[in-house]
Amino acid sequence: MTRAVIFDYGSVLTRTLDLQPRAAWEEQLGLEPGGLQQVVHNGTSWIEVQCGRLPVAAYWLDVGQQLGLKPNETARMRHDFYRGDKRNDELVAYIDQVRAAGLRTAVLSNFSVELRGFLEHHILLDRFDRIAISAEIGVMKPSAKAYQAVLAMLNLPAAACVFVDDQPGNIKAAEALGMQGIVFRDNPSCIAELTRLLAIP
């Protein structure tokens, strides 16, 4: 019997809908489209900060140095980088229905400790019983230890949980532990599959 649904954060609970703030910085810095994303979220320091091995301040200092930015410029770019992220209101409304039906909810995300601030900004903190962030638990998906950490927080077996993530590899790892998995592609298909699995009217 399913008792909880666990959600990824990026590209699931929130999505980057407005790329203009990033594009403006790419033009200023002479980067190709998508180049800022490559520097901010695909470097070695991004892995380190997500694993909790690098402080957030040191991470952004490294990013700023890579881009040739002064500290005050890095602070503005940091704000603008996430400014286009919008809450997935349709899915969040469904999560409210899931909770009203008596099921528990959780977040399992590969991210820095900044994620709690983003969850609060998007009014998401109180919608989840447990929050497992890789930087806080010290391990990233798709390691089995990441899923085991959130299961321990929920005090539930894998078979009692559904996991929603936009990365097929992360879903495969969750299913290997006994969870039911849903690859998030869009709201209609995700909500339909959750409704089928959870038997929510």
Image (spheres, rainbow, N blue to C red):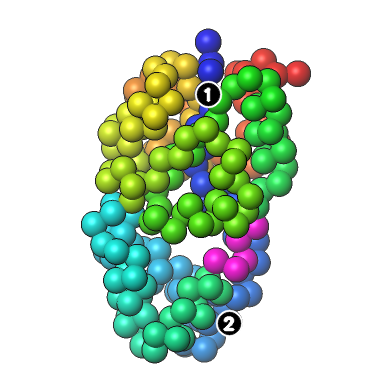
Is residue 197 something that shows in the picture? yes
Name the residue furthest left.
53
Tag of residue 34: none
Quadrant in the picture for residue 153: top left
Q: Position of residue 190 (x, y in %)?
A: 63, 33
Give 27 or 49, whichever is nearer the viewer: 49
Identify whether 64 is placed above or below 116. Answer: below
User: In the picture provided, is 156 more to the left or to the right than 7?
Assistant: left
Q: Look at label 2 and name its amino acid.
A: Ala
Pointer 1 residue = 4
Q: Position of residue 23 (x, y in %)?
A: 57, 77
Disc 2 and disc 1: Cα gap in Å? 41 Å
The kind of secondary structure element at disc 2 is helix
Q: How many marks?
A: 2
Pointer 2 residue = 24
User: In the picture provided, is 176 more to the left or to the right than 21?
Assistant: left
Looking at the rendering, in which quadrant would you find the C terminus?
top right
Question: Magenta segment, which residues?
Answer: 82-86
User: In the picture provided, is 195 more to the left or to the right than 32?
Assistant: right
The kind of secondary structure element at disc 1 is strand
Quadrant in the picture for residue 70: bottom left
Specify whether residue 85 is painted magenta: yes
Give 113 or 142, whichever is nearer the viewer: 113
Identify whether 10 is placed above or below 16. Answer: above
Q: Residues within 10 Å of mark 1 (few under 14, many from 20)?
A: many
